[in-house]
Image (cartoon, rainbow, N blue to C red):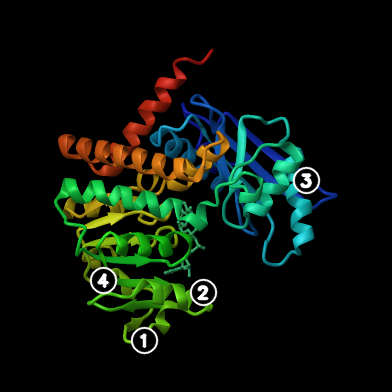
């Protein structure tokens, strides 16, 4: 184990690090079960050619905090499979996934879910092998979380609470959404239905901006035809960076990590950020936002809708129950984090971290040493 990985070991975990190698199936994977004091860990399987052990450590810890903050009866874990999902055939992918499933058969403290490079079909193969996975297709009892917009539904719940507490009326608010995939598309729909004006959206093709508001059904139509949002007629368009400095009241990153950093944070012109993506803003940039008084709800509070949905599915709940639980949990957590941040004059990130840590540490006290 390298020094850079040893750096991630602390009083919370990880509980287990498992390296999996099966030369016959060309399977190379790492599973990190970070902390299971609250319950068996839930976390995705990421498949990409450049995944690392370090990435698995960071993501597993993020899941411990996200699941604890969301009040789920689950700890955090994550696994990475080193393979390029775009350059292998479906049957090669199936062999890798089924082989991985067999390798983790006895590691019952880990419940795998989908992540980059894996999907509900992969989860169905795993369920078939070891009867343990979340994010399943609807035909075998799953709740299709990306189809119903579970994460975006949670973002809206967070927005409702944050807007009320920070006194930013959601009706009429100008919203910008970076990334127009599973999270961004549904966020646009839900926020427009709640009275917000979607003034800017972006995808990997660039940015579309219209101060009077973009028509979301029209944007969805463009995406369903395989076009970029920049094909929107009547919008001002530009590169992917353009969306960062456009004026808005609510800014929703729903694309890539570290997109806001010390280089561009000063150009953000908004009042409230709701983090749809995971780690979209670097730690240093978050501190700058806090000093500038730009409100910023961290990822593991605002974007927990997906994992909450997966947990409801695992415990046999319905889609309706999942949406209700997402709204209720994310509203409560957003309120708690904002109140703590205001009372203690600390950033919402610090407040959220303290909340999650408290829950994990409390649960750890009940464990046999
Ligand atoms: P996705 O692949 O469906 O969509 C990503 C979108 O981002 C695409 O529209 C893509 O064109 C766009 N994009 C890529 N690079 C961009 C750039 N530089 N600028 C603007 N747009 C860019 O992914 P998703 O499921 O919507 O996830 C988005 C983010 O949210 C990821 O960080 C993911 O980890 C996080 N997240 C997703 C969920 C979920 O339920 N899907 C849950 C929690 C967190």
Badge 2 marks a residue whose secondary structure is helix
Question: Which secondary structure lies at badge 3?
Answer: helix
Eye-nearest disc, 2 or 4? 2
**Residue designated by label 2:** 224
> Considering only order in the chain, which callout, 1 or 4, is on the residue closer to the N terminus?
1
Name the residue carrying label 3.
Answer: 99
SS class of the residue under badge 4? helix
What's the CA distance linking mark 1 and mark 2?
Answer: 16 Å
Q: Earlier in the sequence, mark 2 or mark 4?
A: 2
Dot 4 alpha-carbon crowd within 10 angstroms: few under 14, some 14 to 19, many 20 or more = some
Circle 1 residue: 233
Residue bearing the label numbered 4: 245
Position of 16 with respect to 149 (left or right) is right
Could you tell me which quadrant the N terminus lies in?
top right
Above or below, 204 relative to 10: below
Is 336 or 346 nearer to us in this picture? 336
Residue 321 visible, this angle: yes
Q: Are marks 2 and 4 in contact (CB under 8 Å)?
A: no
């Amino acid at each position: 184990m390298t020094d850079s990985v040893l750096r991630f070991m602390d009083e919370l975990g990880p509980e287990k690090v498992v390296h999996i190698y099966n030369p016959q199936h060309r399977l190379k994977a790492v599973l990190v079960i970070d902390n299971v004091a609250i319950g068996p860990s839930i976390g995705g399987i990421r498949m990409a050619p450049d995944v690392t052990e370090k990435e698995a450590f960071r993501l597993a810890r993020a899941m411990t905090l996200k699941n604890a903050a969301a009040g789920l009866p689950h700890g955090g874990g994550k696994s990475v499979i080193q393979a390029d999902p775009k350059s292998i055939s479906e049957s090669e992918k199936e062999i890798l996934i089924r082989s991985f499933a067999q390798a983790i058969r006895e590691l019952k403290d880990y419940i795998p879910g989908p992540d980059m490079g894996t999907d509900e079909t992969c989860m169905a193969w795993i369920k078939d092998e070891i009867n343990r996975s979340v994010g399943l297709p609807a035909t075998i009892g799953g709740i299709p979380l990306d189809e119903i917009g579970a994460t975006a539904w949670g973002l809206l719940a967070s927005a409702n609470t944050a807007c009320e507490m920070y006194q930013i009326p959601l009706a009429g608010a100008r919203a910008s959404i970076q990334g127009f995939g599973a999270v961004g598309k549904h966020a646009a729909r839900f926020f427009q239905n709640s009275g917000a004006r979607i003034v800017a959206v972006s995808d990997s093709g660039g940015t579309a901006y219209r101060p009077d508001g973009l028509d979301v059904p029209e944007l969805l139509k463009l995406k369903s035809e395989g076009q970029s949002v920049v094909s929107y007629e009547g919008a001002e368009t530009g590169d992917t960076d353009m969306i960062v400095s456009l004026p808005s009241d609510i800014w929703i990153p729903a694309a890539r990590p570290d997109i806001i950093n010390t280089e561009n944070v000063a150009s953000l012109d908004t009042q409230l950020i709701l983090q749809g993506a995971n780690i979209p803003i670097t730690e240093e940039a978050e501190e700058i936002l806090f000093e500038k008084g730009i409100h910023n709800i961290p990822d593991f509070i605002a974007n927990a809708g997906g994992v909450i949905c997966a947990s409801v599915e695992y415990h046999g709940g319905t889609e309706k129950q999942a949406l209700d639980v997402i709204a209720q949990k994310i509203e409560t957590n957003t309120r708690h984090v904002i109140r703590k941040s205001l009372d203690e004059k600390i950033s919402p990130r610090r407040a959220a971290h303290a909340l999650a840590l408290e829950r994990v540490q409390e649960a750890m006290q009940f464990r046999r040493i």
